[in-house]
Amino acid sequence: MDIEAVRWADGRLRFLDQTLLPHEERYVETADHHVVAEAIRALRIRGAPAIGVAAAYAVVLAALQSSRGPATAFFPSIRRAIDLLASTRPTAVNLFTALDRMRSALDRSTALPASSVVEVLLEHADSIFRHDVESCRLIGELGAALIVPGSAVLTHCNAGALATAGAGTALSIITTAARQGKILRVFVDETRPLLQGARLTAWELARARIPVTLITDSTAATVLRKGMVTAVIVGADRITATGDVANKVGTYPLALMASVHDVPFYVAAPSTTLDRATETGAEIVIEERDPEEVTHLAGTRVAAQGVDVFSPAFDVTPNELVTAIVTELGVLRPPYTGSIRRLGPPQ
Amino acid sequence: MDIEAVRWADGRLRFLDQTLLPHEERYVETADHHVVAEAIRALRIRGAPAIGVAAAYAVVLAALQSSRGPATAFFPSIRRAIDLLASTRPTAVNLFTALDRMRSALDRSTALPASSVVEVLLEHADSIFRHDVESCRLIGELGAALIVPGSAVLTHCNAGALATAGAGTALSIITTAARQGKILRVFVDETRPLLQGARLTAWELARARIPVTLITDSTAATVLRKGMVTAVIVGADRITATGDVANKVGTYPLALMASVHDVPFYVAAPSTTLDRATETGAEIVIEERDPEEVTHLAGTRVAAQGVDVFSPAFDVTPNELVTAIVTELGVLRPPYTGSIRRLGPPQ
């Protein structure tokens, strides 16, 4: 069965609780947008594109629920839901892109009866979902063309089916190229602190019967230096107008090491991850995570008492370290200011 | 009380079981060299200098035990003990330096009665111990002179009192400079997979009341890029004749990032860590660790099933990324082939 990170199911949102992977594949169905907001905050639903899709459907859930309440509260409660969803995580731009689209649709629907508003919102959420599925497929096709036969690739965190509504971004390239017989092995950074590489990416690739070697994040430098990989492919949470890339912490050193060792460094993301309103990476708000994610392992404290923690969830890779950005609309090459502008306005 | 990683105590070796830190400070006393060999293998005793000291005393334990057995078995059993101890860990050169010295002393003592052989061996082990304590002190003094007032420094793994018989190597510099009022804060890489940074270094620094910020290994790049530290200081397990440095995996990418961000990268090690017989880092045997250290956390599997693991314990930092090597005999500067040769023969 294909992985379905987020999917609309008969008036409810169905999602895979990723915090339980790889031990348990538990799907949650909910009609409550608060449950979705909590799931995004707690990384049960994660990955920039999947968060965008889940938030769009959560707005539909809020509309459905409010349509059964007093008419005067209908629009205000949906707007409150949108604000709540926007407050869950600050860095991934897809969340805001999706919510902006839902808010605009709502603003244009104030003359409609509640049931029609729900329908309009559902159409938009479905469209965001379908667009993401199709983007993943196209990113896979376009990106696989960059992979030479006999490749071993390295990836970081999880940019797979779990991070999207479809087949993933970086992992869509990898699985597509693997189906074409071009990939011999995938090295996966475990990705501290939350181990998305070990728990999620390794699980997805093993399911797809692609040979996986798991490494600690620090071992990537050795793998690159020894020429054990021919390409690095990662996803993105936000890409600025100049092509700076915010992605899981550890992406920037990986890009730096790939550059030093002459290994191409590819970023895969749907065009909804492009944030044309932000010029450079320095302007991106980087989420800081709970210190306990670093001081504790599996609920048990491992770090010494009395220490501070600095735990940014993301880092910024400057555009000059990125060999190409693979979107569903085409493969972008440097200089990115021009290639991103030529894509035209967001779709 | 000062930390005593390894110490001779009345015919027994006393050591702190570092696998239980920071939760429990349990000292083990043993008269059995097999227990010491297991402790080195299992990282209960760790850190290149501490391993050397422990192995030297373990040879004394073997001699003591054999002196109570048949006379003909005396020398052969000590030699077997030396071979066993040499097989515990392949990368740290101090182990072999210490065992070579013990073996030579043994070879020169074959005409002596067993009790005198034990005495001779104990004198050598004590001398290795005292030399290490004094080296740590001198490394601290010489290295602290390189630290400018108002510094924040970054370190990786544990090169502290726990890794030596004395005050440590990299941490001796840090604690000495902190006593001189020059260090405001120390950033500590947690150091996957065994978390020596989170468990051991953070513990040592917190005990010394020095402000500590714990980070994941991947976050070091962000810390360096944002200018949050003014120097990186690490220990070493082996330094070649050309100044290539084998140290805990993750040291090489740290050196690369320090270089890119114009932050000095210092290596601290006693001269016993210099391996003049090895020309470059490419010749160093790198120990590979048990895959379970990566796939499991606190005894529970976290990684997906069916994945391979590549887990080298160390990596090699090429000499051109090292700003200076601080030894007890002086601060070495590039080109290291010359500065190491000028130190003269091993002491």
Image (cartoon, coloured by chain):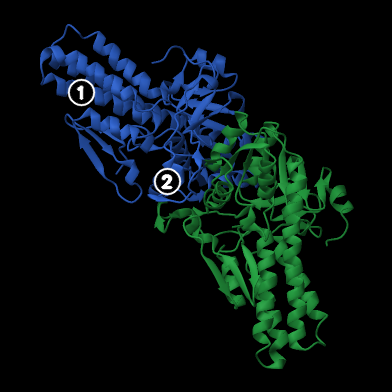
Chain colours: A green, B blue
Task: Name the residue: 57% across, 68% down.
Answer: A39
Residue B117, horizontal then vertical, whole percent: 18, 15
Q: Which chain is home to disc 2?
A: B
Residue A26 horizontal side relative to residue A328, left or right: left
Between residues B218 and B214, which one lies in front from this camera angle?
B218
How many residues crowd mark 1 within 10 Å: few (<14), some (14–19), many (20+)? many
Pointers 1 and 2 in contact (CB under 8 A)?
A: no
As drawn, the residue found furthest toward the top would be B111
Which numbered tag is attached to residue B222? Answer: none
Q: State whether residue B262 appears in this view.
A: no
Between residues A130 and B341, which one lies in front from this camera angle?
A130
Q: State whether residue A150 appears in this view.
A: yes
Give the labeled residue for mark 2: B205
Residue B41 horizontal side relative to residue B307, left or right: left
Question: How many numbered circles does the render carry?
Answer: 2
Q: Secondary structure at mark 1?
A: helix
Residue A337 horizontal side relative to residue B269, left or right: right
Q: Is residue A309 above or below residue A94?
A: above
**Which of pointers 1 and 2 indicates the residue nearer the eye?**
1
Amino acid at the residue labelled 1 = Ala
Task: Name the residue: 56% across, 27% down.
Answer: B324
Question: In which quadrant is the C terminus of chain B drawn?
Answer: top left
Give the labeled residue for mark 1: B62
Task: Name the residue: 25% across, 26% down.
Answer: B58
How much space separates mark 1 and mark 2, taking CA atoms? 35 Å
Q: Secondary structure at mark 2?
A: helix
Question: In which quadrant is the N terminus of chain B drawn?
Answer: top left
